[in-house]
Image (cartoon, helix red, strand yellow):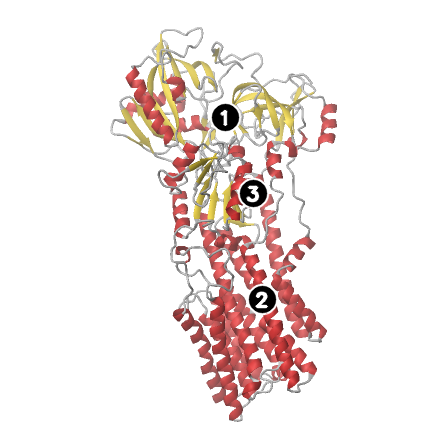
Amino acid sequence: MTPLTGLTSAEAAARLARDGANLLPQRPPVPLWRRIATQLRDPLIIVLLIAAVLTVTTGDWPDATVIMLVIVVNTTVGVVQEVRADRAITALAQLAGPEARVVRDGRQRQIPSSDVVVGDLLILAEGDIVPADAEVHEAAALLVDESALTGESVPVDKRAGEPLSSGTVVVRGRGRAQVTATGAASASGRIASLMVKSTGLTPLQRRLVGVGRLLAGVAVLLSAVVLALGLVRGQPVQLMVITAISLVVAAVPESLPAVVTLSLALGARRMAARNALVRKLPAVETLGSVTALATDKTGTLTEGTMVARHLWTPTAQATISGTGYTPEGQITSDTAPGTFDALLTAAVLCNDARLSPPPRTSGEPAALRTGGSTAPGTDGPATPDSRGPATPASGESPALSSGERAAPGSSGATAPDTGGPATLDSAESTRAPGTGGSAAPGIGEWVALGDPTEAALLAAAAKLGLDRQDVQARYPRLAELPFDSDRKRMSTLHHLPGGGVRLVCKGAPEALLHHPALIDEPELLARAAARADRFAQDGYRVLAVASTDLDSVPDTIQESGLSLLGLIAILDPPRPAAATAVADCKRAGIRPILITGDHPGTARAIATELGIIADGDRVVDCREPGALDQDRDRGQTGVYARATPEQKLDIVQSLQEQGGILAMTGDGVNDGPALRRADIGVAMGRRGTEVARQAADLVLADDNLDTVVAAVEEGRRVYANIRRFLVYGLSGGAAEIAVMLLGPFAGLPLPLLPAQILWINLLTHGLPGVALGGEPTVPGAMAAPPRPPGQSILGAGLWQRVVRIGIVLTAVTLGIAVWAAATGRPWQSMAFFALGATQLGVALGSRTRPATLANPMLLFAVAGAFVLQLAALYAPPLRQLLGTQPLAAGDLLIVTALSVLGYAAARLDRILHPSPRPASAGPQTIGR
């Protein structure tokens, strides 16, 4: 291969066959049978499967059918949700680099990025996504956005001999680069390989494992006791075996999986309505368990755009409002706005960016452009050695020629096989707006084309009323010295309307605020340097702007003898809703943590502004040797800066080892491993990379951190409803077993028949139990701290509540049965009706908002179950099946009235024994 001809087609084909396609490691699709097996491994489902086998063994086909139906429905809902989520993620997916321009056989070709091989010569222009790791061969003002890989919000200047990473974006300039690594061997591939470790059980799954084991053990033990007592009393063996099995089925709330699934599905639906896609159902509840929320900065807490916020001149200061690149906002100052005309006019002239307005109704973007012999706002000409003499605007360097224009929509790539020599474009790309950055813009948003920092200058000038087209037409550009990382500045030369020329220079303050670059008084330069330092300490990127007027066009641009116009402070601003989201997390007892690859000063400024840390709190710089090893106070550290993907993963693992439930939000390739390792990973859908989306459990389609807070509330609602059902279901099951155990001692040989037990269980644990999963959020749920990670789902007073309510249900049922037996009434039928009706009363008493029509499904379910309970007494087919007798109107009225005690027991228990809560609702400390 030569620098001009690239690989031959034969060489490329051989390397593709040897190394494989340029694709990131992909997880194989999960087969349907494995999805089903995962659902069936749920501990409660296993208990139900055992119960189904027992009922089939005894020939109890109706009960076996009911149990299997519950299993099938629960498994189907879980599998369908997972499949739908995966399909939606696939629809959201945007390949990191769908196409690439390479030189093959001496000609430019546009090929799929998957066909790029080691040794290929890449042709890169503004807006291109780098398809593979490469080394720069030639560069002209080449600026690359690496935020998706490193977290750094400021683009990086690239020169010959420097590396490029796959998945990064060219935001300005053009260049050639030789591919050094593809696929799994690339930077993105190495990060993706860190995600091979699968996550363990979610907090809900861990708790349900314990519940399933406990319920199975207790149910089997007590049913064995009932079996033994019956045999001792001389009851038939077959009858007692069926009775024991019926009690096992009754004691285990077989609709609990359905309640869990329904609650999670309703939560997932609510989240979908709020632009959050749940990939795994348990992820909804997991968010309700989190004790800490670790978040990335760029694009998550911040807007992912650069905005000019402050102006400073030797005589005045100003603050600029507005968001994004939209040229709308105000410049607030104690002086006249015209004071800043010279500063912002110079910022517009020394500028190669453009702003693209929202797409027109036809869908065609209308980039802001100017007429004339040149295209102001496009990349100006430059030589590879920017230290050399200025190049006229119409000129071109021998190595970097112009004249070719990219095909529309091709992200800067020319049409396949152009037939011309392998040269680099200097003309602007006609790509769709927004493809030049790591974030996809939202509908109706202005988009930066070029360096985001320069685009921020254009937006600031537009807020002052300066039109880029008018300014650049009034002062046509003659020549330029593009920015490079050595000089840290850029200079342009312009015609003046009245004759002569103006030299404008902008750059880093440390590169410009000194002699001989500036001829201002030392006192002014010192004052400007001090103000620039204060801006930098506050997390701003600072640009100094200077200019001078000359009588004639110089042979070369000399960056000296300039006069300071002022300073411009720029930053990636926090999202408007981020501060509210952080405050809501703290109010809910969730500790926010910032983990970013950005500079410590920037991270501190953003974290302080959003309330993540207070002034003076420690910020850990992960690039300092041993910084993480010396972080002994990780339970309190709020900000980690300059963290690599491996360090992010270490931080997440360390926080988890201290006993916390950790949620991690992010959008970049560098966030992928940590997203995968966290208890729940939350990825940004619009701005997020494919690696981040695939690693996450929850994808936010609107990139809004507020949605995470809403998901936390949904998770708490789900968990509260599961506990609510457990109180209802377990108290009923405990009452059924207690009635069967204590009945014989009260003179009732067999209080209930097996069919009657299963009937009550079917009615109460069926629709009413499932409907409890739809109860609304408890008032004040987000004002309480998260539950302790080690707390059992039966903890916090739940099992005591089960016992108390179970005692009431047992007492009412046995009391009615004993009274009925003593008075010659059909005591077994009355006990049967009372036990079912009182449990339905508990369901009504368990509502979150009992005096409202919230969750009408529960009201209909209880009413329907009550009607069926009546039918069991009066419908001949059911009477024959269940062995019941009809009750007289007076007896029915008495039993119904006493059944209200079930409702009273549930309501009074909540009043007299409220659930214990931690004393403080402040942020929880992990590991303390």
Judge whether 600 appears above or below 86 on screen. Answer: above
Q: Nearer the viewer, mark 2 or mark 1?
A: 2
- Coordinates of residue 882 in the picture (x, y in percent): 62, 82
Does residue 888 appear anywhere in the picture?
Answer: no
Q: Answer whether residue 210 is visible to the viewer in this image.
A: yes
Mark 2 sits on what residue?
A: 214
State the SS at label 1. Answer: strand
Find disc 3 in the rendering and name its residue: 693
Q: Residues within 10 Å of mark 2 (few under 14, many from 20)?
A: few
Binning the other alpha carbons within 10 Å of mark 3 as few (below 14), some (14 to 19) or many (20 upward) gives: many
Where 520 falls versus 81 (above or below)?
above
Q: Which amino acid does label 1 sit on?
A: Val
Q: Nearer the viewer, residue 632 or 551?
A: 632
- Measured in 3D between alpha carbons, the distance from the residue under mark 3 to the one under mark 1, in whole angstroms, is 25 Å
**Mark 2 is on which residue type?**
Leu
Marks 2/1: CA–CA distance: 58 Å
**Which residue is tagged 1?**
156
* Residue under the image location 36 percent in, 41 percent down: 614
Of the two numbered discs 2 and 1 on the same chain, state the one appearing first in sequence.
1
Residue 692 drawn at (x, y percent): 56, 41
Is 920 left, or right, of 625 in this rendering?
Answer: left
Q: Which quarter of the figure has residue 872?
A: bottom right
Q: What element carries label 3?
A: helix
Give x and y (percent) for residue 96.
59, 34
* Circle on res. 367: none
